[in-house]
Amino acid sequence: MATITIDPINPSQSYPPRSLTALYVREWIVKVMLASCGLLSLLVTGSIIFVLVKESMVFFSMPGISVTDFLTSTEWTPTLGNEVHYGIWALISGTILVSFVAMLIALPIGLITAIYLSEYAHRRVRAILKPVLEVLAGIPTVVYGFFALTVITPSLKFVHPGFNIYNGMSAGIAVGILCLPIVTSMAEDALRAVPRSLREGAFGLGCTKLEVTLKVVLPAALSGIISAFLLAISRAVGETMIVALASGSQPHLTLDPREATQTMTGWMIQMGSGDTSQFDARYYSMYAVACILFILTFALTMVGNWVRRRFREAYE
Amino acid sequence: MKSLGNVLDEAVKQPNSVSQRMATAVTFQWLCRLTALCSILVLAVLLYTVFSKGFAHLSWSFLTSSPHPDPTRAGIWPALMGTFWTCAACGFLTLPIGIGTAIFLEEFRPRNRYMRWLHALVELNIANLAGVPSVVYGIVGLAAFVSMFGLMDQSDNAGQSKPPFIDIGSRYYDQFLTLDDRVVLVPVDSNRSPDTALREGLEAIDQDGKPINLHLIAKGESAPDVQSERVVAIRWNETPGRVHRQSWYHFTVPFGHSVLAGSLTLMLVILPVVIISSQEAFRAIPPSLREAALGIGATSWQAVWNVTLPAAIPGIMTGAILAMSRAIGEAAPIMMISGIVFITRAPSNLMSVFTVLSLQIYDWAGRHEAGFHAISAAAIIVLLLLLLVFNSIAIVIRQKFSQP
């Protein structure tokens, strides 16, 4: 807490009256500056939408590329000589595959860890588990990509030799580990916000701890838990470096986790890592893909906010 | 909520006896413990892998040498310096704007309808910006900062780079070879000026910066034999090469694949994080402090500047440092800006091309040779240590100031 020191006022000294006009002018200038800081964030959103729409329009105006083909085709074959297809579903299937595997790991483990932390764990266990989760949350994603490539993939190949060197499963597991701390910390906050009296009431009726947790605490915290899930999905959909390293670069419609695949973010980073001075259709396709990705994550965030506000159980 | 209750009822079937219910409860507790153990196990395996692979490669020369095609001789100096440059520039750009926005949202509660509407819009917008994937910020930065929407006509469709629109702090020279194969430089006005026409007595400087007058050897004229003449003599058909020297304040518009473009893009990524954490810091200040200041006649800004901002600084700094550690680890947006390039020199100004540590890790980890995986792990150790230092500072600040 800041300590506030007050200068002793010397009554014999006379202070000249301060100009109020100068004060008001300064106040006004400060307000305008702060408001422009706030407006800057609106400008950022505006410029994101402007850039994505403008460059996507360049893409769709190119010969041989149509919006219907982009939105309905399942083939993404930009490098093939005669049959060029830009069908977003090939990339979306990769994103769905990786995100699905990730959520299969992050959601149950994250939720159960959150329940453990909020309902069961001893203070000393918490003191170990919380920092571990914070460290996991702070590790850069490229490190998880390295982990997927050097640990998870060899382990998968050891278990089942059918796995490709680059596969959706390995990337999905790593993304799941990445999303785990997000789910845990948000779900735990939601569970802890449930007032004690609810739990005590249920215990008083003779419930076991499990019944209290699953039938009273969990439904009460449901809006927070669902918004945690949605946030985790949106992180998984937007995750880039892990899929760029571990899932390969073959965009095709598949839901087989053993095969190499490519996600929307993977395609964007593949274009970005190459020579971006080649302004051809492949370069501009990046913006069209980013448009879809932006709409998807934007919708997930909006729905998450809406769920949290609409279904919040307010306890006095 | 009702329907969910039913679902859960079915999930946890009503057991008949108390002992069965107790048994389920105990089983679940063990399940919880095992699950919680998972995350500890994952962290342990991850750290063990990284350290066992990379620790042997950590050395002073690894830190101070440049990337090299041979993994045993490669180092991370340019990447390390690139990380420092981008993150420092990003911090200077982000903090004032982030804190300003947080003050605007938390301390200047609007009174009229339009301002209230603006407040709500900005808050909603920031929540949404926090959810945008960083790779999207990367390609927005690529369009907005690197080429400035192509408005400045940075490059045409053939991929030919044109000189920048505004160019400050760099001098351009035409470079010639004399008969003695020494390099002489003829200063030119700007990058756009045409190639220097060769003539007798052309003023040039040599590599040490000494001015010399060139002697032109016309077509068919025999070359001099004397050494002192050969040094300043130049053939009629010699073609110039454009070179430049940059000072520390070198600045161009559009920004190109530069440190500045990278840090502006990182700013977009971490700005929502800084704003949200600063808002929380302001919210944690007891309202009584603010009210007391306003009560003795302070204006809103005086109350912020003298009372709430000093009290919120520890919280803001903690959030800012955590945001910076996110910026250090970000690779996707930087990759969009700078691409995977082979860079052997640390940045020297804001317009230098650059690479960062996480990008270098990505580059090495993606190769097939095991040697590169090992140095990638060594670079990860350096990155993790860097993050550890940052987070320790945040913890120290939190501990120091949270004491009542």
Image (cartoon, coloured by chain):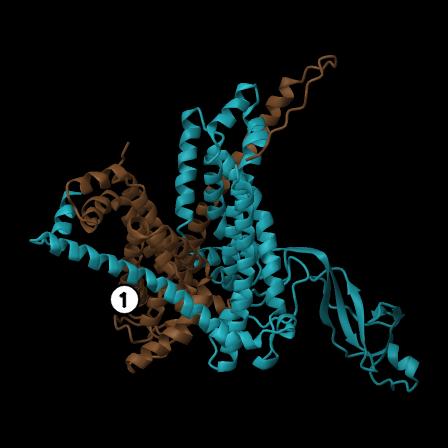
Chain colours: A brown, B cyan
Instruction: Tell me which residue sits at (19%, 42%) in the image.
Output: A203
Residue lying furthest front in this view? Answer: B19
Residue A232 picture quarter: bottom left
Above or below, B184 relative to A117: below
Front residue of this view, candidates A123 and A215: A123
Q: How crowded is mark 1: few (under 14 residues within 10 Å), some or many (20 or more)?
A: some
The number of numbered badges drawn on the structure is 1
Above or below, B273 relative to B248: above
Query: Badge 1 sits on which subunit?
Result: A
Quarter of the picture holding the N terminus of chain B: top left
Front residue of this view, candidates A245 and B205: A245
Front residue of this view, candidates A127 and A63: A127
Could you tell whether B132 is left or right of A6 in the image?
Answer: left
Instruction: Tell me which residue sits at (49%, 75%) in the image.
Output: B52
Which residue corresponds to mark 1?
Answer: A73
Instruction: Tell me which residue sits at (48%, 39%) in the image.
Output: B281
Could you tell whether B5 is left or right of B108 in the image?
Answer: left
Residue B70 picture quarter: bottom right
Coordinates of residue B232 in the picture (x, y in percent): 87, 76
Q: Is mark 1 on a helix, strand or loop?
A: loop
Above or below, B196 relative to B254: below
Could you tell whether B349 is left or right of A47 in the image?
Answer: right
Coordinates of residue B59 in the picture (x, y in percent): 62, 74
Coordinates of residue A313 in the picture (x, y in percent): 25, 38
Look at the image and tell me whether residue A313 can be seen: no
Instruction: Tell me which residue sits at (19%, 54%) in the image.
Output: B25
What is the three-letter code of the residue carrying label 1? Ser
Above or below, B31 relative to B124: below
Coordinates of residue B354 in the picture (x, y in percent): 60, 64
Residue A164 picture quarter: bottom left
Look at the image and tell me whether residue B47 can be seen: yes
